[in-house]
Amino acid sequence: MLSDIEIAHQTELKKITEIAATLDIDADEIELYGNYKAKLSDALEKRLAKNEDGKLILVTAINPTPAGEGKTTTTVGLGQAMPKIGKKAIIALREPSLGPVFGVKGGAAGGGYSQVVPMEDINLHFTGDFHAITSANNLLCAMIDNHIQQGNALDIDTRRIIFKRCLDMNDRVLRNCIIGLGGQVNGVPREDHFMITVASEIMAILCLAKDIDDLKDRLGKIIFGYSRKGTPLYASDLKAVGAMAALLKDAVKPNLVQTLEHTPCLIHGGPFANIAHGCNSVRATKLALKMADYVITEAGFGSDLGAEKFMDIKCRYAGLTPSTIVLVATVRALKYNGGVKKEDTTIPNVDALKAGMINLEAHIENLQKFGVPVVVAINRFASDSDEELAVLEEFCKSKGAKFALSEVFAKGGEGGIELAKAVVESCELPSDFHCIYDLEKPIKEKLNTIATTIYGAAGVVYSAAAESAIKEIEALGRGNLPICVAKTQYSLSDDPNKLGRPTGFTISVATIRLCNGAGFIVAETGDIMTLPGLPAVPAACGIDIDNDGNISGLF
């Protein structure tokens, strides 16, 4: 079979103006970035504001494994299948980060015959949103250090500056560094840190902001550090807000692209779900709901991370109500959870499948706790036996979830018709959507609810630093915010080696930090890193471009 990029290159794209026209978008309501990308204007949002909302469908997955699940591919394929059964659909996705593109994962625009295109642009610089976010983040950092250099009127405690610099790249050597060396003219020396752009509070703010005014309000509320008296200091104190917002003026607008089969897709924002809230922007999702009968979106990694944050953070803030959740799994991944080595997951093994289905079981049960109907989508591979699929179908139905096979990787929208029909049926089922914790509960109680209810933990343990941070946040009167847990994606626990459905473990919280502008509290667990490193052989080693501008190796 052809590689993803080879398939993408063989597809004749429609001009983005044609895609916009299918959504009844006027030519003066889009801002073109070449022929195949555009930003949607504020005027469009205002014009469509009174339109009735369509159905919101969330695509999530079991815990990722080396055997693969195909969540984005399923999302795109489902979007392509909807028109084939007479339904008007839009896809709403996150933008890929350059870190994984050049690291382990490679491209993140779907796969096979279910991709969003132009995939090279989407995976690389796209419309410059990430660069704008990085610039706004680092402008604030530059203004912090300049303020200290110019007399430090705010009495900033250089030991308690909590706002980090960022870049959109996996670069482990920048996790911890010393800045300001080289004498007085180069600033005040201090320890500093970098995180990846997708983990930046600016990214979270962009994805949760309703409009420019809300964006500016959130930017102003960023706590960048503390004075030597222990008083919190805000970005507004540095008069940085206007300039930061100016850098983000275009980045806040959703981006319009298409799939291989010309289904419209809004791609906007890109926080990681293992270290941030893992959802595309509120603006993109809400705008999509005004333009289609069905909006298909996804949340990062497994449902223990992305889906939980989608419900408890994004839906809570945006007033969104999902109609159905699609839970993606593969027979191979479930056998891996059942103890089979990656290289043996293509061999039929019903016993291993049954052993690994406890991970699927946990995710089904967790999603049902939010009161939303669940459809299990099995991303089918040629190696899956009929017996394995039959066992899996029976199990899902016994758990009260609909079941559908998906072959969208190999067949595009045609391979997602069964799934599309199941999703449409599921959207008509009774729903009682609710979040799993009350915001007014203490921080520890909310964390314990997530840990015990979603992860299956026995409890939560805190470092001394985390305990101190909780007291400080609650003293500021900000304990009533949602919790964003930074945790490994590979396990329901905070130990990536505990597969299946572990029990009896505790979640270890190393640090607690307040993202006051974004409006949530981050709990970093285990040894999670907010700036990943590159692997021994980065994906970048296989990427190239020829003299005609054709990129290869971007899978």
Image: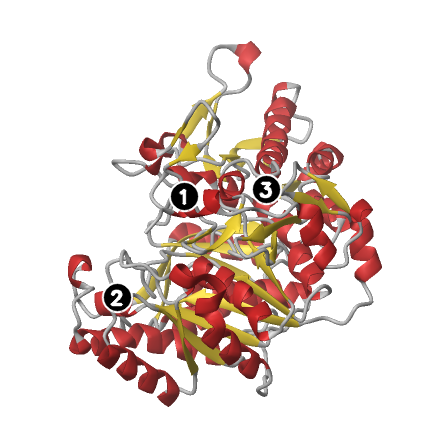
143 or 343, nearer to the observer = 343
Question: Dot 2 surroundings within 10 Å: few (below 14), some, or many (20 or more)?
Answer: many
Circle 1: element type: helix
- Indicate the secondary structure of the residue bearing disc 3: loop
Q: Position of residue 462 (x, y in %)?
A: 38, 58
Closer to the camera in the image, 62 or 75? 75
Q: Residue at x 51, y 74 (%)?
A: 420
Q: Residue at point 47% right, 11% down?
A: 182
State the residue position of label 3. 230
Measuring 67% from the left and 53% from the top, which residue is drawn there?
19
**In which quadrant of the rendered image does the C terminus lie?**
top left
Q: Would you say residue 502 is visible in this rendering?
A: yes
In the picture, measured across the screen, residue 369 lies left or right of residue 350, that is right
| Residue identifier under label 2 | 332
What residue type is disc 1 on?
A: Glu
User: Can you identify the residue that label 1 sits on?
Assistant: 6
- The CA span between labels 2 and 1 is 25 Å
Between 190 and 53, the one lying in front of the other is 53
CA gap between label 3 and label 1 equals: 57 Å
Residue 482 figure quarter:
bottom right
* Labels 3 & 1 near each other (Cβ < 8 A): no
Q: x and y percent of residue 193 in the render?
A: 46, 33
In the rendered view, does 20 fall on the left or right side of 464? right
Q: Mark 2 touching mark 1, by CB under 8 A?
A: no
